[in-house]
Amino acid sequence: MVVAENDGFDAFYAESRQRLFECLYALTGNAAEAQDVIQEAYARAWQRWSTVRGYGDPEAWVRTVARRIAISRWRRARNAVFAHRRAGPPPSIPGPNPDTVLLISALRRLPVPQREAIVLHHLVGLPVAEVARETGVATGTTKARLTRGRRALAELLALDPSEGTHV
């Protein structure tokens, strides 16, 4: 029975949690980090309580696990910093050009089915049949959405549809 297996864990937790918190807080220098590693260590102890409660000093086991968790987190953080330094800062990505901003603004004003069809066909480059399959509609429906969407975009962007230039 689960209750019998965890018999005594609540009392152990209540008696030791403050001491372990103070120890890990002093070790990490961060109260939130100390709480996190303590909680994880207690969770591991609870999972193995039938074994851990038989140790001469279960608190030492939890303290050791918590210290190892904290050290592991420090190492991961340090390695991430080193990796970032080796790779350097990520390349800057230029912002969208004014035409792209206008297009996205106009696309937002289209009904979602028309927008999906236009984006998948014209921006992603999928053939009409693939757009139809991906959106789950008939090819004829996709063609109609593309036609209506193009017409609406032309009006929204004030383009001459035959020339593709701003009016």
Image (tube, rainbow, N blue to C red):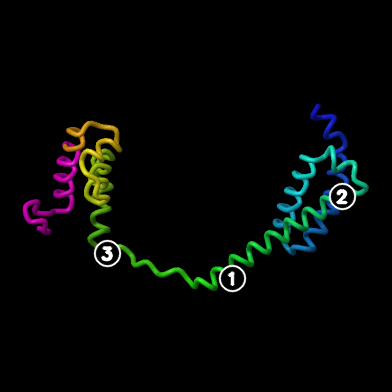
Please state if 103 lies on the left or on the right of 62 as rendered: left
Residue highlighted by disc 2: 59
Magenta residues? 144-167
For the point 26% across and 38% down, the residue is 113
Question: Which tag, 1 or 3, sits closer to the chain's start?
Answer: 1
Whole-Å distance between the Cαs marked 1 and 3? 35 Å
Q: Residue furthest left?
A: 162
Question: Which tag, 2 or 3, sits closer to the chain's start?
Answer: 2
Label 2, secondary structure: give it. helix
User: Does the magenta portion include 43?
Assistant: no
Q: Residue furthest top?
A: 1
Whole-Å distance between the Cαs marked 2 and 3? 61 Å
Residue highlighted by disc 3: 97
Please state if 126 lies on the left or on the right of 56 as rendered: left
Label 1, secondary structure: give it. helix
Q: Amino acid at mark 3?
A: Asn
